[in-house]
Amino acid sequence: YVINYSKLRIWEFVEYSKMIYLDGDIQVFDNIDHLFDMDNGHLYAVMDCFCEKTWAHTPQYKIGYCQQNPDKVRWPDSLGPKPPRYFNAGMFVFEPSLPTYHDLLRTLKVTPPTSFAEQDFLNMFFKDVYRPTPNNYNLILAMLWRHPENVDLKEVKVVHYCAAGSKPWRFTGEEENMD
């Protein structure tokens, strides 16, 4: 995941007042320009889904808790406070800033590596200014498979093919959930 940290360089693009970052495995199906009109001072992104095996090392996955449907399996008091909201870093709205960029680099130097690399790091760094956006701005296909009640396909503007077996350019017919 080391290459993913190059994503931090986008905070250097200070010739723009606001930007939308999109991973390379994302497809935009509708105009999302209105995201530029969101209030300044926040990082906007869609909350991630904890239901895929990539999360198997976490207590969320082990007990079946997902922030996409927190009432389905409640977070038990025995595990302490509920985890903070966690976003998927494949698509987010942000404001470039050199001071933020330099803070990111300083913080990165003293932050131990984690399972989800820059995504964990960005969640930690922006935890106080993160604001969720609706799933239709970064529909991770696992959300469609695991939480179909939260998805209105007519409203989806952005699809993220990051879940295992979801990349259409690698389709073989053997993938789970691709029928």
Image (cartoon, rainbow, N blue to C red):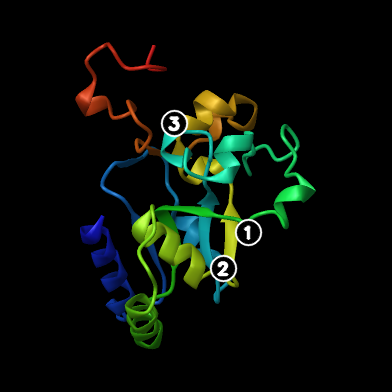
Nearer the observer, disc 2 or disc 3?
2
Q: Disc 1 designates what residue?
A: 84
Q: Disc 2 designates what residue?
A: 127
Residue 43: image location, x then y, percent: 51, 67
Callout count: 3
Upstream in sequence: badge 2 or badge 3: 2
Residue 109: image location, x then y, percent: 32, 79
Q: Dot 2, how many residues are within 10 Å of its Cα: few (below 14), some (14-19), or many (20+)?
A: some
Residue 123, relative to residue 145: is it above or below?
below
Secondary structure type for disc 2? loop
Position of 72 compared to 39: left or right? right
Callouts 2 and 1 close, C-beta under 8 Å? yes
Residue 141's label in the rendered image is 3
Confirm whether residue 75 shows in the render: yes
Q: Residue at x 44, y 33 (%)?
A: 53
Q: Residue at x 59, y 25 (%)?
A: 148
